[in-house]
Image (cartoon, coloured by chain):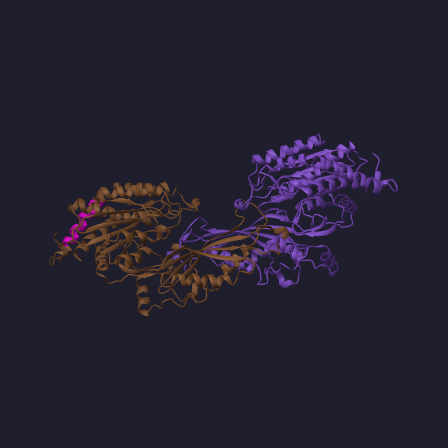
Chain colours: A purple, B brown
Amino acid sequence: MPRAGRRPGGGATAGLGARDSTRAHVAAHARRFVGELAELLRYPSVSSSPAGHPAMQACARWLASHLGRLGAADARVVSTAGHPAIVGRIGRDPALRTVLIYGHYDVQPVEPLSAWQTAPFAPVVRAGYLYGRGASDDKGPLFAHLKAIEVLRALRGALPVNVVFLIDGEEEIGSPHLPALIARLSRYLAADVAVLSDNAVLAPDRPSLTYALRGDLYLELEVAAPVGDLHSGKFGGAAPNALRVMVSALSRLHHADGTVAVPGFERDVEQISARERRYMREVGPSDGALRRETGSLSPVGGGRYSAYERTTIRPALEVAGVTGGYAGPGVKGVIPSRAAAKLDVRLVPHQRPERVHRQIFEHLRRFVPPGLRLRTRERMRATPVIIPRHHPAARAAARAYRRGFGAEPVFVRSGGSIPIVSTFATLLGLPSVLMGFSLPGDRAHAPNERFSLAMFSKGIVTSAAFLEEMARS
Amino acid sequence: MPRAGRRPGGGATAGLGARDSTRAHVAAHARRFVGELAELLRYPSVSSSPAGHPAMQACARWLASHLGRLGAADARVVSTAGHPAIVGRIGRDPALRTVLIYGHYDVQPVEPLSAWQTAPFAPVVRAGYLYGRGASDDKGPLFAHLKAIEVLRALRGALPVNVVFLIDGEEEIGSPHLPALIARLSRYLAADVAVLSDNAVLAPDRPSLTYALRGDLYLELEVAAPVGDLHSGKFGGAAPNALRVMVSALSRLHHADGTVAVPGFERDVEQISARERRYMREVGPSDGALRRETGSLSPVGGGRYSAYERTTIRPALEVAGVTGGYAGPGVKGVIPSRAAAKLDVRLVPHQRPERVHRQIFEHLRRFVPPGLRLRTRERMRATPVIIPRHHPAARAAARAYRRGFGAEPVFVRSGGSIPIVSTFATLLGLPSVLMGFSLPGDRAHAPNERFSLAMFSKGIVTSAAFLEEMARS
């Protein structure tokens, strides 16, 4: 296959031409593409549901069939000990580069359901956005890659690279079974680079490449008293209240200035250079921009770090859930004998999840009086990762963004965690390109999640350009 | 009607004779009585369910019909704006005293259901106890009064007093509609004394008369952030977490020694005399006895008060429920935008509920940062009450206990709240006798609630004796 970009002087012109025809093709088929994506969004593929959930199976089958139509003749649903994954390949030409396209079809739970303006699994288009759970995290961006393949094949007949697909059904619950699957299929999945779009750009005209991710440690806590719930009239003031103990212990996780109060928690946190922080200040979102998204900001650490820094180069410990006592309507006079909490700890290099877990347990234990029992349980773990900014694949991605968005991408850090990225590096020796197509206001994990239709189109053009640029790299 | 007790020298003998025949009659019919009580326990009459709940209606009809069979020809279900009440009368002889028998057929919610060894509304007898929600609070003790009427009429043909019944369907939710009903029916309900059995004795051989009740203020709190739940990866460390703010504010309700930290909360607390505390020490439960019930005790206030004192002459502020964030299985990376809590505040003379509500709100507000909103809502209110120990009706009750239990009753304080007692005093000018038949280990409000069959029989004999003693008083 001729590599157009390698002809002297031909690259820019060929690229522009290809971009224009790609864009025209996307525009001509946009209505159908959105309709197909809406089909995909209808599956309530919430991965915190039990394994074997029919919606997960059905969604996986739909995707395998769609990959087949795109040209991946061997596309199939692969069983795991949990929810199934989907794999497939197009092309096995050893003269071509191979790109692994990773995405996930599972979505976050939809609670609180009452906060949704339209039903989470009945996608609707409103004012240029497609609304529905999974629209931007991650079905929409994943589908942009799939449509890029369709467009390239329609325009060129063949792809400029080999493509292998890996579509996860358990990303939102920490991909517990994916590492084993990747190890088992490592030859099948062999590639030069992985591309993922499970993250946001800064703005529609500000494409960005994510080069750092925070790690994640998700803990469940329980405080339990020796006997059952007690009558708060009879015993109020004398009997231990497991919920009050939990509340009191949780309140000791942070200092008054909002920084984490767990002894040793800060010890392994990497100090970031002044130069790096300057670069972040230049390209990253301002406090004002983040405040517009969140409604308000908490000035953690007395303002020593910007909000962007607090969500990327600084760790965070969020209380993600508390339950205990009576939660029904009206009154119940009860001294709760049991309370539970969920902690979501976002880690930065060089914090180690197992050490942080131990530190938190030891710290909380000090605030649990004798007679009550504290238990912690790890539900998810991901180590923080950094992706080389100057890797050839990252540069190919930057060129693709220029073609797809008409703007120079910036390199940004993300506060989120994508455990698969470190799995790719460890098990397949693969660098990962995090090529976001969603926007900061898309409400991933929250009610009224959405995906911009304009970004969907740009994503398709950019993904197609990336495959072409990878062919030239 | 002859008043046997007033014949010189005849009281004791007549009393003993009456007691013996009553006891024999109760023993002869015990099996049927327990079966009837089990029928009553089968109704899932949880009053925190919405008004109009079929189980409440059916339970009320069953009771009205049963009162009719006891001789209250006019017994009927009375509608309220909430759950219905039941009223009925036996006798209108102006020469006789009139006793108002109050009880309630509504019960507490059963959560956590998994902690029940047998289904809460499928009563079973096991090792001398009848198990089921409402067994001891309050269907069992109420039913002992009803069976006392049956026994007296069977043995004597007529009752020694007039009796009026008032059976509440909303006691567990603060009897919101009962004061209006009592005001409306004040002529019908006119009596010399009210008797209630919604409390426990100290032990099977230690009958007790409750002369003090704590008040109750039940508050719902909410902390809300301006926008919806946020992704804890993207924003963790910068965006406000309503749940963490709630936890932090709740943790400020108490000092490290467990006493209430709300400014002004202690100001109106009555100082109890050394003589009263000595009496309480002599007759009240020891710390060891209370510890056996609760599994462990929290040493609130550094040991300045016994556990009995902490649950009676001292106020208590219990966190009765907290909800916020993700409560489902597995992980959800979320910064909660909303958190709710329920506070159960037990008050002592001369604390005023409305002032305490204001103090708590003002205190908590200090720990809610700008940008988040705190709201409180009062769900229940009862003022603390003291019942004269030397009132003739209290002395009649003491004699009835001697006859029913063969033991001298002690006068005790209760940590619970019975709002109806202050309503009776205010609206009907009625003193109340709190004549408990349940035991401290009966698990009122908790899973595996039960009622001792021996206490059921003693309760019937004691109630019958009380009506006779009231006739003589």
**Percent from the top left, x then y, of residue A104?**
65, 40
**In the figure, A241 relative to A6: above or below?**
below
Closer to the camera in the image, A283 or A473: A283
In depth, the one of A68 and B30 nearer the eye is A68
Position in image of residue A261 (x %, y %): 59, 61
Query: Camera-side residue: B326 or B443?
Result: B326
Residue A91 visible in this rendered orientation of the protein: no
Q: Is residue B24 magenta?
A: yes
Q: Is residue A36 above or below residue B459?
A: above
- Residues rendered magenta in the picture: B13-26
Quadrant into which the C terminus of chain A falls: top right
| Residue furthest bottom as drawn | B274
Instruction: Determine if the magenta segment contains residue A338.
Output: no
Residue B349 horizontal/vertical position (percent): 35, 64
Classify residue A392 as left or right of residue B349. right
Q: Position of residue A322 (x, y in %)?
A: 52, 52
Q: Is residue B215 visible?
A: yes
